[in-house]
Amino acid sequence: MGTSRKALRTTAVGAVSATLIAGSALGLAPAAQASGAVRFVDIAGDGGTVLKANVATPQGADGTRRYPLVVLPTSWGLPQVEYLTQAQRLADSGYVVVAYNVRGFWQSGGEIEVAGPPDIADASKVIDWALANTPSDSRHIGMAGVSYGAGISLLAAAHDKRIKAVASLSGWSDLIGSIYSGRTQHLQAAALLDGAATLTGRESPEVRQVFNDFYASNLAKEQELIAWGKKRSPATYLDQLNRNGAAIMLANAWGDTIFPVNGYADFYEKLKVPKRVELRPGDHATAELPGLFGLPNDVWGDTQRWLDHYLKGVDNGIDREQPVQLKSRSTDGYEGYPDWKSVAATSRKIDLAGTTTIHANVDSGADGGVIFLSSILDQVARVPPIASIPLLPRRWAAVWQSQKSATAQRIRGTVRLHTTVTGTKESGTLVAYLYDVGPLGLGKLVSNAPYTWYGQTPGQPFGVDLELFSTAYDVPAGHRLALVVDTVDPLYIEHNPSGAQLTFSSPTDDPSYVSVPLREQ
């Protein structure tokens, strides 16, 4: 059943409240710490649209020398003071820094375009302004940003050859693949973005229509939606990024409920420029948040090291480190790998034998959690969403469990599900969950992902191949792995007609399984 408009609005209001609290804090705390070297300016963006910005320059800059330039577009829904602390730190170490409020938000003019062509053009206009009005060096230009600013930075680097280095923090590579993976609307993610835009900015008519069609599951507009998102996806411009040659650092969190890490991993592998990817516990932008308040922070520390090396030529060793840096959700410390395919040395295949039928339209109790809250708990206290696997109602949840493992299993990368489904209706949604199950039957969520289909013949089996969201999680010795599949999760819009049933089978010639990527012990 599609989710009602009233429910969508309720979800949006609840989700946005957290965003506004964070935005207010970010707007006040860094500002109180900033020194007097920051000045606030207006910059004419694309078409003359006024962009509110602030500029930080090195102490003692008198126009007799040039400094590397770093441009910071703001995050979705946050004001221009978001980066004041980090901007000042960069300026103190010898950069000119221009942070600007993207069009459509707060005091900047224009309408929200969701990283569309005007936003890309704005980034170049900001660079033009900085070169004309600050002691910036045109040969050493970088961009960085969190979330929305991360995506705009990557897109700008694909379109402006002057940009030599990028740090994309909690951004995206494939916009539609992020919030519409498995042809399933990520409801809470979209509601948060939409609500924040409504309360802190001005959506363009096109963007408003996109949200409306997205919520309404308007299949007649699906290809139009995909094309709209493709235009706003850095992955679309891989050839241009590789040709322009900017050094690209990507950072994200395993539990990012807005931009899951799967897209970054694939995008990283296809980049042919100096590159680095860092993945840590947390949710969307939570890994970067302490650094915005001036606290010690790995993400911002590595961002400055990246910019120092590729804009200032500092020999700090970052180019000689393993470029894939992962931090498990279960342990402290980082693991380095030469590339993404080396993250998982082997895999464990768990057979999903037998035939199981479940009824749709009811939440079984297996869920991916609540946007932000669940992944933050996992980040801070290592408490992911939990379900009692023995107590899950088999009427609404299909459950398969592995044997106990004699040794610890270090899951690294992307879990893959292959199964055969027979539905009683032509459309439907399933959500798959992988759990770490302890001796008492309590399952800790390792990963999940949704999958939606349309136009299937009722009673006719069809194959499903689904990638769960990539992760790094250590399963203790003596524990089992459990795969659970149900049809309802508050994170997503589900498309099961009333009374639908789903049967999972494992034909002899096409057995069902879940493949779990493992690091060597």
Image (tube, grey):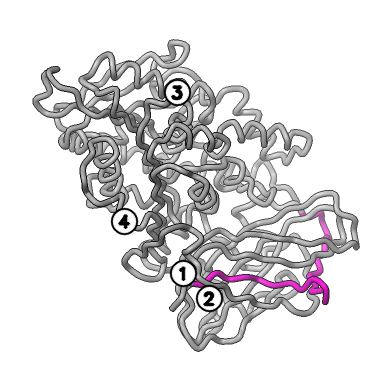
Residue 182, label in figure = none
* Cβ atoms under marks 2 and 1 closer than 8 Å: yes
Q: Is residue 497 magenta?
A: yes
Q: Position of residue 19 (x, y in %)?
A: 43, 42
Q: Residues within 10 Å of mark 3 (few under 14, many from 20)?
A: many
**Label 2 – label 3 distance at C-alpha:** 44 Å
- Mark toward the viewer: 3 or 4: 4
Residue 473, label in figure = 1
Quarter of the picture holding the C terminus: bottom left
Residue at the limit of the structure toward the top, as seen here = 48
From the image, tell me which residue sits under label 4: 321
Q: Residues within 10 Å of mark 4 (few under 14, many from 20)?
A: few
From the image, tell me which residue sits under label 2: 436
Q: Amino acid at mark 4?
A: Glu
Mark closest to the chain's N terminus, 3 or 4: 3
From the image, tell me which residue sits under label 3: 103
Mark closest to the chain's N terminus, 1 or 3: 3
Q: Is residue 31 magenta?
A: no
Tag 1, which secondary structure? strand
**Label 2 – label 1 distance at C-alpha:** 9 Å
